[in-house]
Each structure stands twice: as C-alpha cells, then as structure tokens.
Amino acid sequence: MKFVNSYKEKMKKYNEEHKLKYYIDTMGCQMNENDSLKYAGIFESMGFEKGEEDNSNVYLFNTCCVRENAENTLFGRLGMLKNRKLNNEEVYIAIVGCMTQQEHILEKIKKSYRFVDVVLGTSCMSIFPEKLYYAIVDNKKKIEYIDVSNALEEEVPIAYNDKYKASVSIIYGCNNFCSYCIVPYVRGRERSRKPEDIIADVKKLADEGYKEIMLLGQNVNSYGNDFKEKYTFPMLLEELEKIDGIEIIRFMSPHPKDFKDDLIEVIKKSKKIARQIHLPLQSGNTEILKKMNRKYTKEQFIELALKLKEIPDVSLSTDIIVGFPNETEEQFLDTLDVVRKVEFDQIYMFIYSKRTGTVAAKLDDEITYEEKVDRLERLKKLYEETLPKLNEKMVGKVYKVLVEGKSKTNNDLYTGRSSQNKVVIFEADESFVGKVVNVKIDSQHLWYLKGTIIK
Ligand code: SF4
C-alpha cells in the first residue's frame, strides 16, 4: 500500500495559515518507536510543527497492548486532554497502534471517549492524512475505525530523531502465536518488505550520513518466508553489508527456533554486523516453553546460545518472563540454570502479565504476586553477579564504538555504544561525534565501561 499524497497536500495548505503543532506519545516496543518516527515524518510533510506535551494541537497516541498498565496510561491521558477540548482549545486526538486492534478497547473508546477524533489500527499510515484532514478541516467528528493490519506500507515519510543511528523495519506481523503474546492478533501475519525497498532505504540513510542501522521485525529471521522466490534474512544481510557508509548493522528480534547455521555463518564473516545478538529465552524450562508455544527446549536453547558465544567478542542479550501461569519453583530454577550457563550481557526481565485474547490468559494461575516478585529479584541478583565478570573480560581489549555525544552523567566525557551494545565513556571532543572509533577498555563499572580512544 503506497502513501497517498493528496490529503497530505491539502493539510499542508491548511497549515500554512493555521500552523498547528503535533505531539506524539509512544508506548511499547522498538517497532512502535519506529512507527512514531514515521508518524512524525507524516506530520512534518503536512506542515505541522513539533510541539510539546502542553502546547500542541494534535495529540497522537501510538499505543501498545503488551503491558497491562498501558491501557490505564492511555485513558488517563485522554481524560486530561478532554478538559482542554471542553475549554474550546483547538485540540485533536488520534489513537493508533496495537491497542486499537482489540475489540474491548475500541468499544470503550466509542462508548466513553467520543471526543477522540481519529482511531486507526496498525499499518494504517497511508490513510492517516485523510482521516486527520476530515477531523480538522471537514469537522466529521465520528470515530471511524479501519483495520488494514495485514497491509504493507511503503514510501511513508520518516523523521529520524538521531543523526547517526536509524531503524528500518524489514518485516511486519508475526505467525508464531506464543501463548502469552498479543502481537499476532494485533499486527497481523508476517509480511516481508521487498529487499530492493529495504536496500534503497538503507542506501539513502548512508547517503545522509547514518552510520548504524537497526533492522526491525517481530521475528527478523522469518524474513522472506512469504516470498515465492527464495530470499532469506542472511541473504538480505549480505546485501546490506555492501552498502558504503553503513558501519554497524544490528537486528532485533530473531526467534531462537529460526536461528539457523547460514545466519551464524553470515554474522561470523561480516565486518559490520554487531557482535551483539538478542536471543529471547522467555523461560528456561522445557515444559513452560511448550506451554508458551516457543518450539524449542531448554537444551536446544543452550546449544544455540553457546554456539553463538563462539563468535569472537559476541555478547548475548535476552528477554525472560518469570511467573508464567503456575510456573513451579523447580521450573523457575531451570531459568536460573540457563542464565548461569549462557551468561547474558543484558536481560530484559518481566513478570508475566496476562493479555486478554491470548491462549495463556485462560490458564489457571495460583502463584502469588509476591512469589513472582521474589523470582524476579533472584534473577536480577544472578544477572548482576554475572555481569562484572563478562565486562572484566573486555578490559584491555579494543572495540569499535560509534561516538554519540557528551555523556549525560559525566559532562567532561563522551559516550557511545560498542558493537556489543555496551555503554562506553571516554575522553573526546565534538569532532568525534558521529564517527566510529576504536576504544581500548580501561575499566568496567557494571552498567558502563571506561576507555581511551586509540588511533
Ligand atoms: S515471536 Fe512470539 S513473542 Fe514474538 S511477537 Fe511473535 S508471538 Fe509475540
């Protein structure tokens, strides 16, 4: 689905006189962050100026339904904007993203939040200018909901908020149906973007001076499964490697069940693919993994993780859910066992949170919240004991770092991330910002490393 320009032009004309401001409130994952950059690009192509939370005219809520409290956050914020509308301020509200794909949310908006102007599902960017134009100029105050969650949108303008790092979506949707996850229901089935469109986007970013790209998808290593002709994620990586100017390539997230040897070989050969791999474990117990519909066992995960760790200088990050319905102490100990054996450099850990509409939401759960919190604390403790050991191994070695700017915590120093996605701080000056430099690590400080730029 291509981006339609006619309403964009109409809205732009309107803004020549009215100069409306926009504000985007993003909830959720990196896919949503990337979508919000596109919405910002659409707003700017329609002549809107970027505003602040308290002085804007159009408020766009890009919603997420992975965490339970996101709904409360959204409805709380809508309540506050309602007062500004009642005071006859020129305020418009649009809600987009995953949450609007859920029937009960849609009903709630229709029933109790009728002052909302535009409600669109995921993959609806192409029609956003038209719907916004109706709300603002044509004054058609009716909540209209359009579900094109299986669409693949191209040529959407994008306003990046970083000069050197950019994310590029390569595949939308998910076919995996992990039992705790709502994503396949709200983002539709897997749709891979054509390689030529992705390559063109990355070439354009390289021409604009971007050095690092993050390839995004719910399951990046399913890329190409929906093509008639064979074209795989490793093949795409090999093409992107050839693009001059791009120095670091990251991707997020691969599914362990689809992480095959051809991908490992491409990573090993590559000079640009970051030495950091995100490998979501979720649980270390085979029985729980089965209930989660993850399609790998504890042993298969460990085997894969240890194989990846043979790649020189590689760091592994992961996601772990504790307290899946009726997870026993013994099953939780399996998770700790995997964490001990694999030694992750970064763990995103969560307490299981029930999502209405998923298979796991129907499971009985007798574990108390206190038990779940206790498990989370024990996991955190183990992780924090492991991390210094891993960091220590980096001391004395030299790593590629993209210099991002001044350190926020120590203004005399500069900061960047190593290929392993570790925060590194060092002495530098403004001329280094945006460059990839070699940094020798001098010391480790748990959440960051200190180093020296070497020529
Ligand atoms: S792979 Fe599983 S956890 Fe990830 S988006 Fe798909 S269903 Fe959700």
Image (cartoon, grey):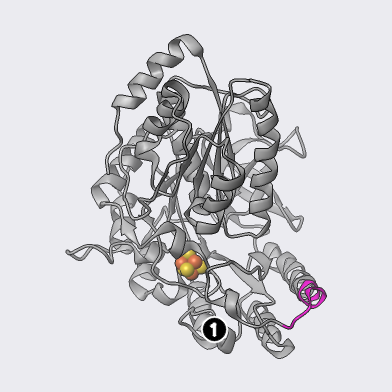
Is 220 placed above or below 197 here?
A: below
Quadrant in the picture for residue 283? bottom right
For image coordinates 54% across by 42% down, the residue present is 437
User: Within 10 angstroms of label 1, few (less than 14), some, or many (20 or more) residues?
Assistant: some
Residue with the most extreme top position = 17
- Residue 312 spot, x, y in % from top left: 51, 67
Q: In which quarter of the image is the N terminus?
A: top left
Which is more toward the observer, 103 or 340? 103
Instruction: State left or right for residue 453 relative to residue 274.
Output: right
Find out whether residue 392 is within the magenta segment: no
Residue with the most extreme front position = 111
**What is the three-letter code of the residue carrying label 1?**
Lys
- Residue 158 spot, x, y in % from top left: 42, 35
Instruction: State left or right for residue 150 relative to residue 428.
Output: left
Q: Is residue 414 visible?
A: no
Quadrant in the picture for residue 229? bottom left
Find out whether residue 370 is within the magenta segment: yes
Q: Is the magenta region chiefly helix, strand or loop?
A: helix
For image coordinates 73% across by 37% down, the residue present is 408
For image coordinates 74% across by 87% down, the residue present is 329
| Element carrying mark 1 | helix
Instruction: State left or right for residue 64 relative to residue 250.
Output: right
Which is more toward the observer, 198 or 428? 198
Q: In which quarter of the image is the C terminus?
A: top right
- Residue 442 spot, x, y in % from top left: 71, 52
Q: Give the range drawn in magenta.
A: 366-374
Which is more toward the observer, 232 or 406? 232
Is 94 placed above or below 353 here?
A: above
Q: Can residue 143 be seen in this view?
A: yes
- Residue 396 spot, x, y in % from top left: 66, 57
The residue to which callout 1 is attached is 291
